[in-house]
Image (cartoon, rainbow, N blue to C red):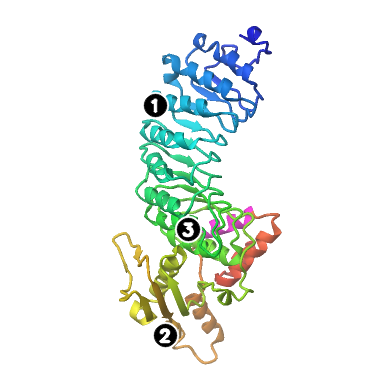
Amino acid sequence: ECDQRMTVPDPLAFNTGHSNKFLADGRCLLDDDLLAVAGMLQERPPLEEVNLDGNVMLTDRALGPFLAELLKDESSLSLRKVKLSQCKGAGPRTLEHTIQLIQKVQSALTHLDISGVHIATRLQLQLCQSLGQNDSIKEVRLAGTGFGGTCITNQCTTSLLSSARLELLDLSWNLFCKEEFQCLGTCLAQNNVLKHLLVDNCAAYIATQDTPVSELVERLVRNSGLVSLSLSNNRIDFRAAVVVEDALHHHPHMVRLYLAENPMGHLGVRSILRLISRVESKITHLDLEGCYSGASQDTNLEKVGYQVFSFTNPGGKYVLNLSRPYHRSLLKMLYKTAERFKLSADKAFTIESFTPPPFVHATKDAAGIWQVPTSGVLKVLFNVEAAMDAGVKGLADDDFSGFLYNHFQLTRFTPHFIKVAALFSTWKSMDGMAVEQEVFLRALASDFNMTVPYLDYM
């Protein structure tokens, strides 16, 4: 085959007959190199893995016939992994054969990676339906494939997440709008099989509106299967950080959360640090690299229309548009605050108006989730001063240390001792990142009640 195509033989273990895995990632193969391999597939043992990652010079001219050869006989039935990541020359022919391969290898194929390969819109639904119906697929990577932004995206998402075995899904570097994130979140709320989700750099931006990834995060309050979640570079600011804190507060299995390169600033980092420091949270690994930019408390945010949740001083007037994820989470955080101060909703809230009326206070469902309205505008006064005053009653007039102790216990966040390790692990991961460390310390100073030994360790 090499003589016929005038190519130099590549001494890969598969080519020499010493392996049933064709591992040619990053080999800079040309079309003729791959066609030479395709010509001898019938003479080799059944393939277990095909890895062509990073071969950017391969095109449909070779990839199509190569996959067609795999489909010709029963040798493909043992194929477990297909990796075509960054084979940017792959076209419709390659993808059509890939879909046929997924449909044929129903009980063996576990991994598919076509990241960086543009998928034509007409093939997206076929691909997702084939993956959803496959009995063995566990890992699917579709990063940077042009997924999203079409009239069939929601159908594709629903088909993908209908898989009974899928454990890892990478949809990073695609583009999703609000409605598509809503669909993804709704599917995940009903799916407890998926363990790892990556949606880095997927949030379409609309000026003056919440980042659409908030719609996904808010719905994860109903999910109990995810172990890791990657939301890097999704324009998550301090508002979306409150949604993250609220939604993942009680998640039973999530241990890794990746939020790198989001403009949270110290206002957003406050929410995330509170999240990982709660005993109910299972998160132990947190990535906050590059999250130092964003709105600052030094800016008068109220003048520009932003409402900020303050853990230490939550009282004030709030105007909440409950069609927004941030405002819904803000209302739920206020209910949680009233619960923390042991105040009933009637005592903590003074309702000024609600459009359209009437407003009925939220209650918890069987899962312990606050059920707040999803539409309407609520104007409310929130006041917990009575509970604060009660917390310092009975102290002597000159007992300043006792007053400060009681006040900080009431108003500041004390990390649970079993979660201090996660907090310090995040601090250690920022070694050499001076700006990130400054933001981390500002967040601690704003909300946390830390003892001297903790500070000494840092």
Badge 2 marks a residue whose secondary structure is: helix
At 49% from the left and 29% from the top, the residue drawn is 95
Q: Is residue 29 left or right of residue 385?
A: right
At 60% from the left and 25% from the top, the residue drawn is 59
Disc 3 marks a residue whose amino acid type is Ser
Q: Nearer the viewer, mark 2 or mark 1?
A: 1
| The C terminus sits in image quarter | bottom right
- Please tell me whether residue 285 is drawn above or below residue 381 in the rendered image: above
Helix, strand or loop: magenta stretch? helix
Residue 338 drawn at (x, y percent): 40, 75
Residue on which disc 3 sits: 214
Magenta part of the protein: which range? 419-429
Residue 378 drawn at (x, y percent): 40, 75
Q: Earlier in the sequence, mark 2 or mark 1?
A: 1
Badge 3 marks a residue whose secondary structure is: helix
Residue on which disc 1 sits: 103
| Mark 3–mark 1 CB contact (< 8 Å) | no
At 38% from the left and 40% from the top, the residue drawn is 159
Residue 80 drawn at (x, y percent): 46, 25
Residue on which disc 2 sits: 386
CA gap between label 3 and label 1 equals: 35 Å
- Please tell me whether residue 153 is drawn above or below residue 235 in the rendered image: above
Q: Is residue 406 magenta?
A: no
Disc 2 marks a residue whose amino acid type is Ala
